[in-house]
Amino acid sequence: MSCRSHLLAVTFSLVVLGFVLFFVDLPELAGQAPAPPAIPKTYPTLTTPLNLVVKPGQTLDLLLTGTNLGGATAVWTSIPGAVTTIAPGQKDAAKLQVKLTLPANIPPGLHSIRVATPSGVSNLRPLLVEELPSTNEAAGKNKSAATAQSLTLPITVTGVADPDSSDFFKFPVVAGKPLTIEVLARRLGSPLDPVILLRNSQGKELGGVYADDTPGLQGDCRLVYTPLQSGELIVELRDCIYRGGSDYAYCLRIGDFPGATTAYPLALQRGQKGTIGFTGPDSSSAKPVSVTAPTEPTVPEITVIPRGSSGIAGWPVPVRLSDWPEAIEVEPNNDLGRATPLPVPGGVSAIFAEKGDVDTFKFPGKKGEKLIIQVLTHEVNAPTEVYLRILDEKGNDLAKSNPTAAEIKLEFTPPADGTYFVACEHLNYLFGPSEVYHLSIQPAKPDFRLTLGLDRFDLPPGGIGLIPLTGLTKLNGFNAPIAVSVRGAEGLTAELTLPAAANPQPNAPIWIPVRADAKQAPGVVTLAIVGQAVVDGQPVLRVADNRDALKAAMANLPNPPSSMAIQVAAAVVPAPPFDLTVSLVSPEVPVGGSIKGRIEAKREGEFAEEIQLLAVTQPPNVTVKLNPIAKGQTSAEFEIVADAKAAVGESLLLLRGNTKVAGSDVSRVVTPVLLKVVTGQPASPAAKITPEKKK
């Protein structure tokens, strides 16, 4: 490790709590309440409708709409192997013409698209890869059964719901040949809460043939119907309370494909091979799929595609990945004598197949070793509501789950060594092919969870970008340092150690400095932020989650795709025409006293504009009084003042310079400086802290 890297690792490891917001635009920050992380106003924004549909092997022109799109440097998609080209000479900040080419072997599924400019990277918008032929809604011309838009099946229709109205579509059917009619809206992040119902060719509603909030589809709907006679049917689609607008987008799929809701089994151990089947109201025709689970810990799930005899793809469903052995329930297991064995740690996929079904599992328990027993249902697209009980060998209840709790979870400490049992019942006494769930048992070892406040940031080649860590959840007595780093992005690195006492909050995040290689090309790089700790002598790795930011971007979708919820987008933007270095008269500031410092600016070419200076982080009760570097000048003095309440100790000082270049805002984050708050007078002789020059 170089001297500079060692210095960064040391300073980053001494991160102070109560960090100040990166995007605050005030030069003096002491005494102000920090605000939650925010996206800079100069970042591009995509407002393109949510129903972009593309086909494998297709090359098509996309018109992206939004704000601050002028001068776009890259268009990124999560589709592996996709190639995007921006049409030259575009200056419209609200529109961007893009050519997109997809590989021929991309399976159908939900992906995302972003745009990068010299100012940053946009929000994500869903992008659908679809095998079916597709068409657009005849907007405004299909508002009654009499004017229903004609379709040829199978088909995918993309449209937008208007307020106080319905959209109508007609299509031919054959008696006895089943059809699946499905609406993707909520799952795409659309606020539309869809309802579909069928009418005959004269427009008369078919009694009872409708769908609204199909279980397992997070508010979307799916209808499986077998026509009694050949002819023509009409489907009506609308919002459940007749809302609408430009963002109320939908994707209507009609064809002979399986209506599978969930995979079965619901989980697979990393690195293991398995055969995945399907469950749901109309999944019997779906053929099982053989898969091998990846070993990479930053991959939380995979998706599998149900296909029936027609070969047409149903919508993909997720399979969770775990770090322990996974099993499938073996029936009959309705009593203790026939309980399905389950190791600790271990997981099992199960189903309430019959009326009154009680699933029983047995596991070994050690006296005093606390266990976590947990059930996943809605998180894996299942509608099931499960009630848990822990029993001893005589059938006595030892613990019960709380039916009103948000999680289906029990903490249980065996009173003695022996065999114990989990009895699972349906809380609402339901049963059938959709009523599946995943049960896991694992020791309650110290653990942690990391939460990010944003899903995007920017940084220049050779420079630093910041992503806010807004939450650290410590479980089961966890109390250890956490090494934070970057995974999945070549050329981007981070070295940050969270001390055991770290306690980031949404209004006081800890900023993770990420550095780009000097040769990094402009564009979008996606990455995962991971934390690693040692627990009981064993390494533990956890991936930071930005689920709250993703939910907000997807109209508060309850369970957005886990793969999207850990993805962070970094825009590599052009390097600003200046660099900054910091020197302090002393690395120590006394309580109740102050020290002086200087910021030097190395300007490039003819750049001479004023550079505003802001404090990104500073110790609590310490004020950094900054002055701008005046136009044409190369330095500015500043003062660090510690009041009487300043805590003694080491902490991180992180500064940023802002300016305008050709009318656009640009910034440079300064290499962090280690600052000590001490009692008495500052150290002498003076110490100067500057970043080591690149070799």
Image (cartoon, helix red, strand yellow):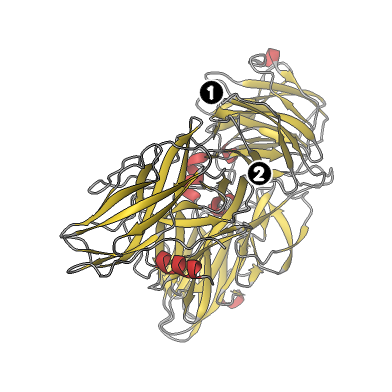
Task: In this rendered view, identify the residue nearer to me: 454 or 559.
Answer: 454
Q: Which residue is mark 1?
A: 245
| Mark 1 vs 2, N-terminal side | 2
Residue 351 place in picture, x, y as percent: 62, 59
Which of label 1 and label 2 is nearer to you? 2
Q: Tell me the residue at 41%/59% (across/down).
A: 672
Please state the total of marks drawn on the protein image. 2
Compared with 534, 251 (above or below) is above
Residue 678 place in picture, x, y as percent: 22, 68
| Type of the residue with mark 1 | Gly
Secondary structure state at the residue bearing disc 1? loop
Q: Does residue 468 show up?
A: yes
**Residue 594 appears left or right of 78:** left
Secondary structure state at the residue bearing disc 2? strand
Residue 694 place in picture, x, y as percent: 54, 61
Compared with 124, 410 (above or below) is below
Q: Does residue 405 show up?
A: no
Which image quarter: residue 329?
Answer: bottom right
What whole-number distance in Å separates the C-alpha atoms at marks 1 and 2? 23 Å
Q: Residues within 10 Å of mark 2 (few under 14, many from 20)?
A: some
Which quadrant is home to the C terminus? bottom right
Q: Residues within 10 Å of mark 1 (few under 14, many from 20)?
A: few
Q: Are marks 1 and 2 in contact (CB under 8 Å)?
A: no
Mark identifier at residue 288: none
**Residue 337 appears left or right of 273:** left
| Type of the residue with mark 2 | His
Q: Which residue is mark 2?
A: 111
Residue 413 place in picture, x, y as percent: 41, 77
